[in-house]
Amino acid sequence: MKSIFCERLKELRKEKGIGQVELAKALNFSKGSISLWENGLREPKLSSLIVLAKYFGVSIDYLAGVEN
């Protein structure tokens, strides 16, 4: 079952008009990590969630699906 996080990450990335490789480079993550997160195969560490939330200008709660 895919989590809300995977859908929100993919949606935010597409809204910004960037691919997984560009996002990975911008945040110093591997492309593989981005792919695993978006496909619901892994969950990011808290430190990665913080970086993603800051980059996209959203809260961690939003990314995790706690708030709309």
Image (cartoon, rainbow, N blue to C red):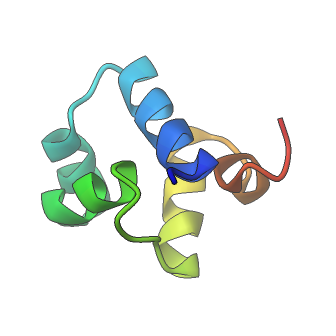
Give whichever of 48, 33 is nearer the camera. Answer: 33
Q: Is residue 47 left or right of residue 17?
A: right
In the displayed image of the protein, which residue is found farthest to the right? 67
**Residue occupying the point 82% across, 53% down:** 66
Name the residue located 50 percent from the left edge and 63 percent from the top edge: 51
The answer to whether 31 appears left or right of 62 in the picture is left
Q: Position of residue 30 (x, y in %)?
A: 17, 65
- Left or right: where 65 falls relative to 46: right
Q: How many marks?
A: 0
Q: Position of residue 46 (x, y in %)?
A: 58, 78
Give the residue drawn at x 36%, y 49%. Answer: 38
Q: In the picture shown, does residue 5 fall above or below 12?
A: below
Residue 45 locus on image (x, y percent): 50, 80
- Please state if 4 lies on the left or on the right of 68 as rendered: left
Residue at the far front: name it.
Answer: 1
Image point 28% across, 56% down: which residue? 34
Quadrant of the drawing holding the C terminus: top right
In this orientation, which residue lies closer to the viewer: 54 or 63? 63
Asked where in the image residue 8 lies, by quadrant, the reply is top right
Viewer-nearest residue: 24 or 34: 34
Q: Residue 53 or 41: which is nearer the viewer?
A: 41
